[in-house]
Image: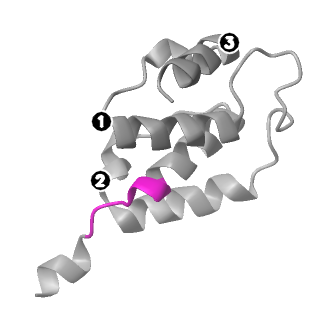
Amino acid sequence: MEKTAEFLPATQKQIAYARSLALRNQTLLPEEIQHDRRALSSWIEAQAKLKPMYSGDTAGDGRPTSKQVAFAERLARIKRRSIPGECFRDKGLMSRWIDGNR
């Protein structure tokens, strides 16, 4: 029972929020921490304290907003599909992917 207390998998909400923070802060989300709830929680806490690299509306930079990413990830889970990587770099592509998967 102690082993499960030491290692719990990250939740989908944690991962979605971490990805939106990574986009906001223009940083990479390390793959190895995405499977450990505690490690991901620590990473999220540190990233949330950082000043955003761009405003929430991504004024002119072409990347999807954190709300777009979170919504797309929720759709992907419901539809059991993956979001193409290029959608995370282009607001228009993310919008089209969302429209096609509603």
- Horizontal placement of 42 versus 10: left or right? right
Q: Residue at x 87, y 15 (%)?
A: 60
The quadrant of the picture occupied by the N terminus is bottom left
Is 37 located above or below residue 61 in the figure?
below
Q: At x 70% / y 20%, what residue is drawn?
A: 63
**At x 13% / y 79%, what residue is drawn?**
3
Q: Is residue 85 left or right of residue 70?
A: left
Comparing labels 1 and 3, the label whose residue is closer to the camera = 1
Q: Amino acid at mark 1?
A: Arg
The region drawn magenta spans: 8-14
In the picture, the disc for residue 35 is: 2
Residue at image mark 1: 80
Which amino acid lies under the numbered mark 3 shown in the image of this protein?
Gly
- Between the C-alphas of marks 1 and 3, the distance is 22 Å
Left-right relation of 32 to 97: left
Compute the Cα span from label 1 to label 2: 19 Å
Ranked by sequence position, the earlier of labels 3 and 2 is 2
Q: Which residue is mark 3?
A: 92
